Image (cartoon, rainbow, N blue to C red):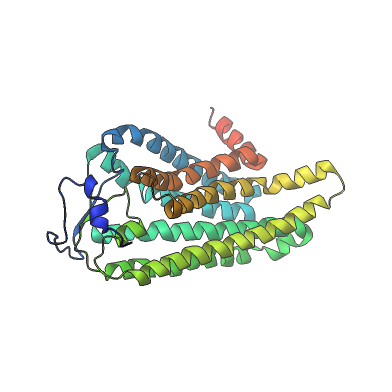
Amino acid sequence: MQETPFCLRVGHLLPYSMSDSNTTDFTKSSTFILLGIPGLETAHVWISIPFCTMYAIAVFGNFTILLIVKRETSLHGPMYYFLCMLAVSDLVLSTSTLPKMLSIFWFNSREIDFSVCLTQMYFIHCVSAMESGIFVAMALDRYVAICDPLRHSAILTKPMVARIGLAVVLRGIIIILPYPFLVRQFPYCRTNIIPHSYCEHMAVMKLACADVRISSYYSLSVAFVVMSLDVIFIAMSYIQILRAIFSLPTKDARLKTFGTCSSHLFVILASYIPIIFSFLMHRFGNNVALHFHVLIANVNLLVPPMLHPIIYGVRTKQIQDSLLWLLTHKGM
């Protein structure tokens, strides 16, 4: 069955109808229109309340993590360096989308320049790839700490941690760099309306009136390869970690050792489960309403940055103690 043109599939969202004979050419410098959450425009103000709350918690929590690690010298180790990288990436990821989202919800400011749209798209996917790499680095740290604790400080030295961090950042920058260049070369003549609250790669690509298979195949390959390799490495690390834990002689020793990596495990689950759910919904949820797809996409970008500092704050005693000292020292 021939696929319905994208501009016609979203026609019920537009204030006017479009046809192939009544389209306008949009140049590379054109302004795109973000609809926010299509079909729920009247509820935008109410939807903004939980979104704004999640963003405020994410900003406060991640800045608190950075402040605590910087102040407490006992936390200057590989695990907390990688945690700081995760906090920075969470701040960039949520900040790259929510301010524009709120301007749509509150002020109906839907216009976004084509170049700004590509920049936003690049940061979203680039930082997401970096976060996946940070989870791998954290898994490596936990593997060495539990399976070879006597050599942990000798293996994960500060220069080694810096090299791992640099590799994670460069990988994200390089593998996502083709995204904006591939999207920029396409002509856009169907519509300049994006039925989304931010410039998501696939949503922008669907507006092009050209063969986008190269860009589509590349994005799918990156998502599959990066996700698969990272998940495989993390799974292999935790298989070895669990084997080491179950080989311990007492139950108390097993629980105490597992507690040192439980925060990382919960953070991984909080990040990957929404991604997997969203992927399955896009692939098999053809009958799911468009506004639900957009809501889930927004939640995927806001919930993990909010949960990460909460999980580490609740599960890590050193962070709890440092936060308590910081609050009491400030006279609170």
Q: Residue furthest right?
A: 249
Residue 132 screen position, x and y as percent = 53, 58
- Residue 115 left/right relative to 215: left
Nearest the viewer among 114 and 232 is 232
Q: Residue at x 42, y 38 (%)?
A: 56
Residue 208 appearing in the image: yes
Residue drawn at point x = 49 percent, y = 51 percent: 275
What residue is shown at x 34% (from left), y 46% (from top)?
290
Quadrant location of the N terminus?
bottom left
Q: Position of residue 328 (x, y in %)?
A: 58, 30
- Which residue shows up at 43% across the image and 44% down it? 299
Horizontal and vertical percent position of residue 49 = 36, 33
Q: Is residue 164 left or right of residue 147?
A: left
Relative placement, left or right, of 17 versus 280 is left
Farthest-out residue, left: 22
Q: Position of residue 32 (x, y in %)?
A: 22, 55
Q: Nearer the viewer, residue 84 or 28?
A: 28
| Residue farthest toward the top in the current orientation of the protein | 332
